[in-house]
Amino acid sequence: MSPRSAHAVYESPAFCLRVKELREKKVKWEDVALIVNSSFASKCKGLSLRKWWHDFGRKRAQHVVESPHTPQDMEEIAELYSKTWDGHLVIKGDVCIGADFHMPHFHADLTEKMVAMSKKMKIPNLLLLGDFANFESLSRFDHPDPDDTLKRELEACTHLMDMLLKSYKRIYWVLGNHDKRLFRALNFGLDLKQLGSMICQEALKERRLICSGYSFAIINDCWRATHPKSYSRIGGRVPSILADKFRMHVIGAHGHHLGLQVAMDGEHVGIDCGGMFDPAKIRYTQQEDSTHGAWTPAFTIIRNNCAYLFTNNPALTDWGFWLPKKRRKP
């Protein structure tokens, strides 16, 4: 596309107002470029967004604000009054997936094993698949634990995040329903990126911690890791339905149990990946009975696009094989 025609796209009222809105929120230029890329920049390759803004865009945006604009076609109406939702995380390479830590009630022993297996299998990335924090104090259900204050939970999150960052080059974090407890309490005046900044600001600045406003991430274009809204007592059922829907393999959190089902197409698989919680420390699983299945601590590693499931169940994971204890010299 020639610079002249690219300028014409840049001067779309919707584009100008979107850039103006992001800059007023003090979004960095590299992040602005990523955000507007999804809707506009594919049409505008070759132009510097920052240079265009300083040379032309600022005046154009002010003109759009001061002069009521009548959309010229249907596409412009759609750009001006709506937006696309395609900002989910895309992860390339091998990754370890740990869901539902429910901090501070995480499974310390299994977390140590997760880090050790990641080191053994040379896995550089970790995906926190929602519900890293429990936010018990903000629960709408009865009898929250008075010891689980917001301050204590955030402190626990900070300490564990610091330790995990020593073992992984990059940590990705997607939304879970417990994470939303905090945002709902603040009338959604906070998002996951800002929460990540509260927990580990330096890692966020260095892009070693990447937070998403979405509940899923796409791994190597063939795995969809998600913290879905849907729930089933049958392990693997929800992910297998989603595998049919999206025509890719699916790893699902939220159900807290472990299970695998092949999708109806016979090609893709759906995995309920358990979680990194310690069931003995979850108040409402210990104080009350329900017909829900038992919670299963587990994590998953995606290596060469193949899923490895690890749990403390000896019928499924032989830890003596995977992490043999070193013999002491006599």
Image (cartoon, grey):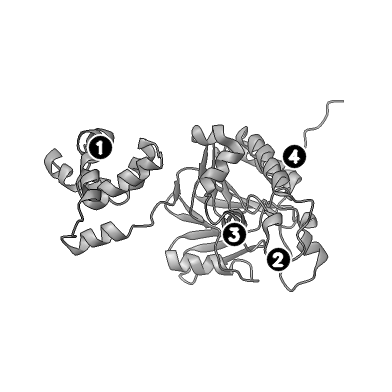
Q: Which residue is mark 3?
A: 177
Give the vertical position of 8 relative to 274 (above or below): above
Disc 2 versus disc 1: distance between alpha carbons?
Answer: 49 Å
Drawn side of residue 20 relative to residue 103, left or right:
left
Disc 4 versus disc 2: distance between alpha carbons?
Answer: 43 Å
Q: Residues within 10 Å of mark 3 (few under 14, many from 20)?
A: some
Give the vertical position of 158 relative to 254 (above or below): above
Circle 1 SS class: helix
Disc 3 versus disc 2: distance between alpha carbons?
Answer: 14 Å
Per the rendering, the mark at residue 324 is: 4
Q: Are marks 1 and 3 in contact (CB under 8 Å)?
A: no
Label 4 sits on what residue type? Pro
Circle 4 SS class: loop
Q: Residues within 10 Å of mark 2 (few under 14, many from 20)?
A: few
Please tell me which residue is depicted at 24% across the width and 44% down the height of the picture.
62
Q: Are marks 4 and 3 in contact (CB under 8 Å)?
A: no
Q: Position of residue 79 (x, y in %)?
A: 27, 57
Label 3 sits on what residue type? Asn
Circle 2 SS class: loop
Q: Is residue 269 visible?
A: yes
| First of labels 3, 2 by sequence position | 2
Q: Residues within 10 Å of mark 4 (few under 14, many from 20)?
A: few
Q: Which residue is mark 2?
A: 141
Q: Are marks 4 and 2 in contact (CB under 8 Å)?
A: no
Please tell me which residue is depicted at 83% across the width and 29% down the height of the picture.
328
Q: Position of residue 156 (x, y in %)?
A: 71, 42
| Residue farthest front in this picture | 66
Using the rendered view, name the quadrant where residue 231 is placed: bottom right
Disc 1 versus disc 3: distance between alpha carbons?
Answer: 38 Å
